[in-house]
Image (tube, grey):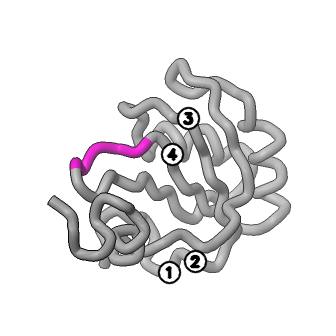
Amino acid sequence: GDPRRDEPDAGQGVSLLVRNIAYNCTKEVLREAFTPHGAVRDVYLPLDYVTKEPRGFAFIEMGDSRAADAAIAAVDGSTIEGRVVKVLQAAQKRKRPEQMRDIDPRTANGRGP
């Protein structure tokens, strides 16, 4: 399986996008912030494909839409690790790393470093 994912069968819940998170923020910290609002099925911190550094956002997969709505209401605009975060429903299912590589202008079309 993918070591970045906590749950091998993740993908059935509702994905939330969390923006403006601190670069040193961990999956554990994010899980703690969202758990009071419902089941957290998965926490995914995308890394920059080139630098392997965190990209300042995360995906949180909540167990269902009720939990997702509660989490958005509670966590959006709150402070995590000193940063005011923005939480919204993810517009689409998150991408696999191979797809991110094709989308990232630095690595698309095989012209990457």
Residue at the (40%, 40%) spot, across then down: 26
Helix, strand or loop at disc 4? Answer: strand
What span is in magenta? 51-55
Secondary structure of residue under mark 3? loop
Q: Quote the CA–CA distance across marks 2 and 3.
A: 23 Å
Say above or below: 82 vs 78. above
**How crowded is the residue under tag 4: few (<14 C-alpha within 10 Å), some, or many (20+)?**
many
| Mark whose residue sits in front, 2 or 1 | 2
Q: Do the residues labelled 4 and 2 touch (CB within 8 Å)?
A: no
Relative to 72, is 2 on the left or the right?
left
* Mark 2 or mark 3: whose residue is earlier in sequence: 2
Dominant secondary-structure state across the stretch colored magenta: loop
Of residues 7 and 56, which is closer to you in this image? 56
* Horizontal and vertical percent position of residue 44: 46, 58
Left or right of residue 37, residue 1 in this image: left
**Which numbered disc, 2 or 3, marks the residue closer to the eye?**
3
Q: Which of 27 and 96 is in front in this view?
A: 96
Residue of label 1: 9
Numbered tag placed on residue 20 in the rendering: 3
* Residue at figure coordinates x 28%, y 44% from the top left: 53
Three-letter residue code for mark 2: Gly
